Image: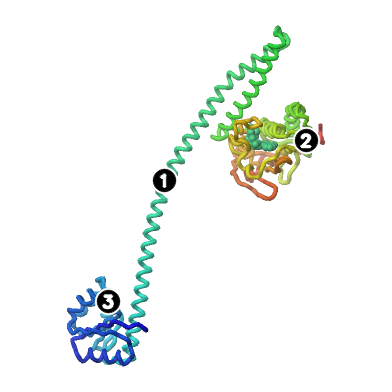
Amino acid sequence: MEDTLKILVVDDDKVDRMAVRCALAKAGIQMELSELADGNDAFSILSTTAYDCVFFGYRLLDRDRLTLIQQLRSSDIKVPLVVLTGQEDEPTAVKLLKAGATDYLFKSRISPENLAQVLRSAIRVYRAEMQAALAKDQLRESHEQLIRKNQELERQQQQLQMQNLKLSEASMLKLHFLATMSHELRTPMNAIIGFSQILLRPKLSQLTHQQADMIERILNNGKHLLMLINEVLDFSKLEVGRLDLKAERFDVSKVTNLAVSEMRSLAESKNLSLLVQIDLQNSLIYNDPVRIKQILINLLSNAIKFTESGEIWVEVKELPVNRVAIIVRDTGIGIAARDFKHIFEGFRQVDQTLTRKYPGTGLGLAIIDSLVRMMGGKIFLESKLGVGSMFKIELPRQIILSSVGADVPLKVDDKMVFSSSQNSHHSSYEVRQASIISPKFKL
Ligand code: ADP
């Protein structure tokens, strides 16, 4: 305590006050000491002047001084209070401490050393108490801030929930609209296709070459439009969970060859080789053949659409744990890693501009993604810009119709892998082992 301390001694006994003053001086305390004979003046003096410590002379049964200590403590006056009591009994000391005294010393023990020690420890204790009180205040303040922030967060969460609700209502309306519109459009479209086909029948052919050419265009455009309408209908049904798989046991190699033969002329029109390799000991699987073919057609038409030269490979092979893989590989324009996730979302294309080179709805991969998820399978994509792409679909040999998956990226490495689903259902269906010789690389 190097600084000069401001000390107040309150005692009606002049001799006792002098004893305190002398003891403190002897102890070498650098101080500015004031004295008061009447305790009643203490309150007003302490309200106007700041002291580092107050010594209170206290006699037994002096009710007024006990009240004074309590009043000081409950007021704004912050100061260490040391009581000097003439009575050497512990209960009195406890009573004083409870009233708010910082420390006490029996008058019989007043000596320079004892007084200096009590003074130092009272100031130290008092400062520690002040710091603790300050920390408590800060803690209470930050607790209150936390409560306020929590309330604000809860309010924002409620707002978000409301917005989410509105968004999902709007989304449901949009899907409902898409489903209704595409359903309604299919009927006239089928009529256009049907009548065009009738008109083109050779028996009815009283058409000029130019008329036949025009009707053929109507037919082709009608078919293309119907395909687009069907994509929108499938997508909206899948989004609201209203598309059912019609599972049966079928030969996946046959369905693969059928899809490939349907797409062959398109590949040939672009001078692309279309290679097939089916490597299965048992080509019977339990799944929805229409949807498997749809997946293959979608992947193949993308491969053809996005490849200018080179080859397209289709591979079907066995995988461990009763699964099969369908792989479509191309030497096309490739996909940048940053677009991997987006292209599986509905209406998303790498080139979103209106002047884009490649036509399409951007629904094909979203539909494949949902279908594969329903089948309890996974999609893997590997691609490199300017080199080509590989879409690999892993499926259980037997699907469980209630299979539901979740969007989980499996692993992202320097290649690029995106998985649409992780599903570990085990089927209760049994597929008979049949040995079918798989065609190897049919051209
Ligand atoms: P669409 O083909 O109708 O645009 P898809 O959902 O089938 O819609 O594909 C989404 C996007 O993914 C495509 O627009 C294209 O940018 C990219 N894509 C899909 N398949 C390939 C592929 N084989 N090669 C390059 N890009 C592809």
Q: Is mark 3 within 8 Å of ligand 1?
A: no
Earlier in the chain: of badge 1 and badge 2, it is 1
C-alpha span from label 1 to label 3: 52 Å
Q: Residue at x 77, y 32 (%)?
A: 272
Describe residue 303's horizontal placement relative to residue 118 as left or right.
right
Residues tagged 1 and 2 counted as in contact (Cβ below 8 A):
no
Dividing the picture into quadrants, the one containing residue 42 is bottom left
**Type of colouring:** rainbow
Crowdedness near tag 1: few (<14), some (14–19) or many (≥20) residues, C-alpha within 10 Å: few
Q: Which residue is mark 3?
A: 50
Q: Is residue 401 visible?
A: yes
Q: In the image, what residue type sits under mark 2?
A: Gly
If the image is split into quadrants, where does the C terminus sit? top right
Please tell me whether mark 1 sits on a helix, a strand or a loop. Answer: helix
Viewer-nearest of discs 2 and 3: 3
Q: Position of residue 178 (x, y in %)?
A: 54, 28
Q: Is residue 371 visible?
A: no
Dividing the picture into quadrants, the one containing residue 241 is top right
Dividing the picture into quadrants, the one containing residue 26 is bottom left
Please tell me whether mark 3 sits on a helix, a strand or a loop. Answer: loop
Q: Which residue is mark 1?
A: 158
Earlier in the chain: of badge 1 and badge 3, it is 3
